[in-house]
Image: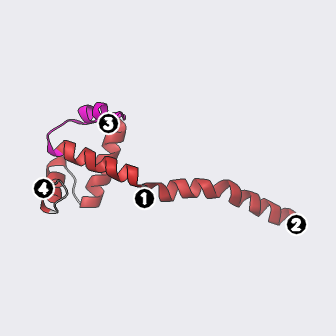
Amino acid sequence: MANNELGNNLLQAISLPYMKSKYLGSLRRPRRKEQFVVLKSVARGERSKEIAVQLGISERTVKAHLASIYNKLGVDSRAAAIVIAAQRGLLGK
């Protein structure tokens, strides 16, 4: 019984940080802020590669941000994302 309890405690200690980073990571503010920058850059007509260079991230990360933005806005294209973002006042002035 003591061995089983020790094993469970060890499993929790190992998996808890992973679970927090995996499931709570999307709630971190820096990522959200970066997504707004990507959205505004797309609205200005910048390409993924240009945005990546500007932000110092990979083009793949820009595309991941775009996928997340599309999901949040319920769209499937850059043009639709810009329209919806503008309608919701997300692009500022």
Identify residue for label 3.
55
Mark 4 or 3, closer to the camera:
3
x, y percent for residue 93:
12, 53
Whether residues under marks 1 and 4 lie with C-beta atoms below 8 angstroms apart, the answer is no
N-term-proximal mark, 3 vs 1:
1
Whether residues under marks 4 and 3 lie with C-beta atoms below 8 angstroms apart, the answer is no
19, 76: nearer the viewer: 19
Identify which amino acid the numbered label 4 is placed on. Answer: Val
x, y percent for residue 63:
31, 42
Within-10-Å neighbours for mark 3: few <14, some 14–19, many 20+: few
N-term-proximal mark, 4 vs 3:
3
Extreme right residue here? 2
Identify residue for label 2.
2
Magenta region? 43-59
Colour mapping used in the image = secondary structure
Q: CA distance from mark 1 to mark 4?
A: 25 Å
N-term-proximal mark, 2 vs 3:
2
Q: Quadrant of the N terminus?
A: bottom right
Q: Secondary structure at mark 2?
A: helix
The label shown at residue 18 is none
Look at the picture and state if 4 lies above or below 51: below
Q: Residue at x 17, y 53 (%)?
A: 91
Left or right of residue 54, residue 29 in this image: right
Q: Quadrant of residue 26?
A: bottom left
2, 89: nearer the viewer: 89
Left or right of residue 32, residue 37 in this image: left
N-term-proximal mark, 2 vs 1:
2
